[in-house]
Image: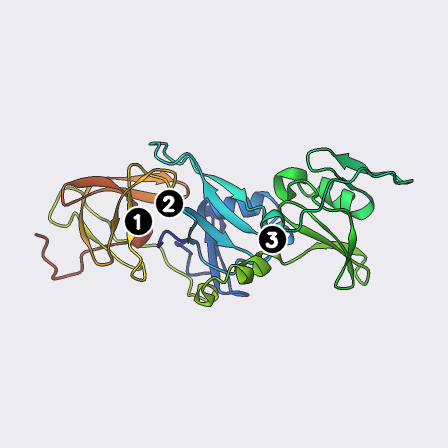
Amino acid sequence: MAEGLYLVDSSGYAQERGTRYFPETGHNLQGAFFNYFQEKGGLEIFGYPITEGFQEDGLLVQYFQRARLALTGSRGKRAFGSGEVGVAPLGELMGHRSPPFEPTYHFPYRYYPQTGHALSFAFLDYYQAQGEDEVFGYPITEPFLERGLIVQYFQQARMEWHPDKKRVQLGLLGEEYFEARGLDPALRAPVEPMVEEITPIPQRSERGYMRVRGTKGEGLHLREGPGFASATVYLLPEGTLVKVLGGPVEADGYRWWQLTYEGLEGWSAEAWLQPLGEGETPP
């Protein structure tokens, strides 16, 4: 659905707000995804974003060249900002796990009983230096030759040894999984940097109304509480007029407003709400 990423400064980069626009692929990164991206290795680990945020399998996700991030949490709880970012196990999802293997190598290695595979040499060094299982998961194969490169699959990534550069690089699992799922190519189309709406929205007044805008017809979730982990009360269609009851509240890197619509109350992210224009009269 329409709960994607937004709020990018027109300069293209506004780190103090936790936002960034990547002209290399034409996509925005912000909020909890931006923070995780920055903390866990940035371009080296994830590559560039190749989509905006969108709903997939009931979660807010964003695809990168090398990974897919998802905002998870306990659905249905009124936990403000409780969502956590996780890395999708693309190596597992693409069926790359091989049977457990008890190595008898005559060189230093580290065995991971969680999946029954070992790491050694440059792959082990890279794994330990770049975040270990939190970023990559555990190894699910031994090293082998694939497309002319020595590779090793992990639950969440693929390491590749590039002899010309004499270094480890991560494979483009995000792009490969996007293609394998047959997702709409339009999701990868470049978008413009989006600017924060700065028009103040007075509450409990004749101007205290907003319309659902920018959802591309997919609608906006009215949730039990601020934050993507809160359960959906109702899906507001594009163009719906809603009344502001309270807010804003910061959650998951977004501003949320308490709204009412036809007797229902809930919270929605400001990114897809627009104040009434000049000349519009509220009911």
**Where is mark 3, residue-wise?**
94
**Where is mark 1, residue-wise?**
270
Q: Residues within 10 Å of mark 2 (few under 14, many from 20)?
A: many
Q: Secondary structure at mark 2?
A: strand
Task: Give percent across and percent down for residue 29.
Answer: 48, 54
* Residue 18 visible to an observer of this rendering: yes
**Relative horizontal placement of residue 172, taking residue 203 as reference (left or right):** right
Residue ID at (47%, 47%): 16
Q: CA distance from mark 3 to mark 1?
A: 36 Å
Q: Nearer the viewer, residue 14 or 179?
A: 179
**Relative horizontal placement of residue 39, taking residue 130 as reference (left or right):** left
Q: Residues within 10 Å of mark 1 (few under 14, many from 20)?
A: many
Residue ID at (26%, 43%): 257
Amino acid tagged 3: Met
Screen quadrant of the N terminus: bottom left
Amino acid tagged 2: Tyr
Q: CA distance from mark 2 to mark 1?
A: 7 Å
Task: Give percent across and percent down for residue 225.
Answer: 30, 36
Question: Picture quarter containing residue 146?
Answer: bottom right
Task: Give percent across and percent down for residue 205.
Answer: 12, 45
Q: Nearer the viewer, residue 97 or 121?
A: 97
Considering only order in the chain, which callout, 1 or 3, is on the residue closer to the N terminus?
A: 3
Q: How many marks?
A: 3
Q: Nearer the viewer, mark 3 or mark 1?
A: 3
- Eyeballing the image, is 66 above or below 147? above
Q: Nearer the viewer, residue 108 or 200?
A: 108
**Where is mark 2, residue-wise?**
254
* Residue 189 visible to an observer of this rendering: no
Amino acid tagged 1: Glu
Q: Are marks 2 and 1 in contact (CB under 8 Å)?
A: yes
**Relative horizontal placement of residue 141, taking residue 246 as reference (left or right):** right
